[in-house]
Image (cartoon, rainbow, N blue to C red):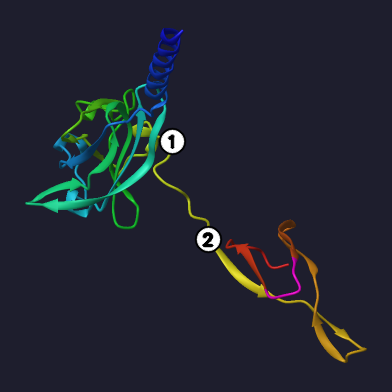
Amino acid sequence: MRSWYIFLLLAVIIYACVDDQINEPQSTSQTELQFNLNAPSSEGGRSAHDISDVRYVQFSIESEDGTIAFTKEQLEVLEFSGEFISEPFALEVGDYQLTEFFLLDDEGNVLFATPKEGSELAKLVDDPLVIDFEATEDEVNKLTPEVVTTEASSAADFGYGAFGFEVAEFFEIQLTVMVYNEDDQNYELVEAELNIEADGELIVEESLDAATNDVLIKDEEYEDN
């Protein structure tokens, strides 16, 4: 009988050890990636800008299975011994694809970009996007995408939908609505509905609180009504 107890005890111990190994979280190895910046080739066209005007790298990366790892991520550009590199960033060891690559100035304007395969400007570089690369452990992995100046070219020429964002201009006004209370013989704040039309179009429609309200109006040319 005692042998059965010993057998069952060993079985429980073995099961517990195996269960712990199964449930133990799998650790993922981390590594670093860094971009090296090279001046555009002469085939990329003459430009009023050079690499020294670049302040940021903006990029997008997907994993091997198409999962987005980084989207429009920005890194600061550093000068080191006359060379321009991005600050390194961490990612997991594995296979990836670089899907977007831009070089920006300090105001966020795109000065250079890497064309995508099949685009009009893809012929100007040896390795257009998408670029496959492997992030290996125990070293700083380095990529040097070729870039072309964006001057005199559209985003579509590079294979992109757009280089940036259109910033909407607006102006702000502050409104308060008050009515005279005859009982208290004083003005008091009240809620109200605000509608503003311009050129026959309703451009503002919002509810106002019994307080000072900030109202934003799109800055456009409107005809006098």
Extreme residue toward the front, this view: 1
Residue 62 in the image, given as x and y percentages of width and height: 36, 29
- Residue 83 shown left or right of residue 68 in the figure: left
Q: Which mark is residue 181?
A: none
Residue 60 in the image, given as x and y percentages of width and height: 35, 36
Question: Is 62 within the magenta?
Answer: no
Q: Are marks 1 and 2 in contact (CB under 8 Å)?
A: no
Q: Amino acid at mark 1?
A: Gly
- Residue 126 shown left or right of residue 59 in the figure: left
To which quarter of the image does residue 183 belong? bottom right
* Element assignment for label 2: loop
- Residue 84 shown left or right of residue 182 in the figure: left
Q: Amino acid at mark 2?
A: Glu
Residue at position x 76%, y 73% in the image: 210
Q: Which residues lie in the magenta part?
A: 208-212
Q: Disc 1 and disc 2: Cα gap in Å?
A: 22 Å
* Element assignment for label 1: loop
To which quarter of the image does residue 90 belong? top left
- Let me know if residue 154 appears in the view: yes
Residue at position x 58%, y 61% in the image: 220
Extreme residue toward the left, this view: 81
Residue labelled with disc 1: 161
Residue at position x 29%, y 30% in the image: 121
When the figure is inspected, residue 186 is found, relative to residue 133, above or below; the finding is below
When the figure is inspected, residue 208 is found, relative to residue 138, above or below; the finding is below
Residue 83 in the image, given as x and y percentages of width and height: 11, 48
Q: Identify the mark nearer the N-term, 1 or 2.
A: 1
Residue 22 in the image, given as x and y percentages of width and height: 40, 21
Residue at position x 31%, y 31% in the image: 28
In depth, the one of 24 and 69 nearer the eye is 24
Residue labelled with disc 2: 169
Secondary structure mostly seen in magenta is: loop
